[in-house]
Image (cartoon, helix red, strand yellow):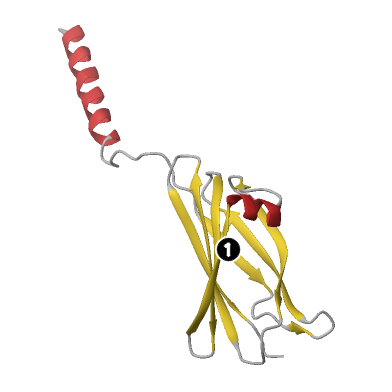
Amino acid sequence: MKKSKIILAVLILSMMALIFSGCGGVSGPKTAKLNISIEPNPVPYSSEQGLWWYTMNISESNGVGVSITSLTFNYYYQEDQFIGTQVLVASEFFEWFETDYVPAFSAIQNGIDSPSKDTSEYHDIVIVAGIDDNGNSVEATVRIDYLPK
């Protein structure tokens, strides 16, 4: 009789463990979290160099590496009047950053200059896109503001 109670108790505990382990739902592999930042932002004009110069930092903060597929610059001036777009594909991105991969919990950075345009205030919307190590598409966006000359 004691043996059957022990078996019953083990079965009940096993069923409870199965039920409670499923309460959180089934989750798949993690998705990378890309972040992009600009230092300084807004970007001051350098009259000595005749351009605006800044550092772009791209990082991953969720523990999954990312292969960068593109870096897109959308250019605007004054009151959000669109000027144009420049897209760097992976090979061009590699030339700028000397890599096209952002490791998990890591960052890459590069100094970037923007040539003199005119005296109008303008800004860029920059989008970095990639595929993480688990096959998920990821991207991050940042606005870069430029101080007038």
Q: Position of residue 120 (x, y in %)?
A: 62, 92
Q: Is residue 113 above or below residue 3?
A: below
- The residue shown at (51%, 66%) is 141
Please tell me in which quadrant of the rendered image residue 134 appears.
Answer: top left
Q: In the image shown, does 94 or 35 lie closer to the viewer?
A: 94
Please tell me in which quadrant of the rendered image residue 1 appears.
Answer: top left
How many labels were placed on the picture?
1
Q: Is residue 77 above or below residue 3?
A: below
Q: In the image shown, does 41 or 11 lie closer to the viewer?
A: 41
Quadrant of the image for the C terminus?
bottom right
Q: In the image shown, does 141 or 63 lie closer to the viewer?
A: 141
Q: Along the horizontal axis of the image, is 61 left or right of 21?
A: right
Would you name the residue on which mark 1 appears?
A: 36
Q: Position of residue 119 (x, y in %)?
A: 67, 92
Q: Position of residue 27 (x, y in %)?
A: 34, 40
Say which element carries label 1.
strand
- The residue shown at (66%, 65%) is 56
Mark 1: few, some, or many residues within 10 Å (few <14, many ≥20)? many
Q: Position of residue 147 (x, y in %)?
A: 66, 87
- The residue shown at (44%, 43%) is 30
Circle 1: residue type: Ile
Q: Which residue ends up furthest to the right in the rendered image?
A: 48
Please tell me in which quadrant of the rendered image residue 96 appears.
Answer: bottom right
Q: Is residue 65 above or below residue 113?
A: above
- The residue shown at (66%, 89%) is 118
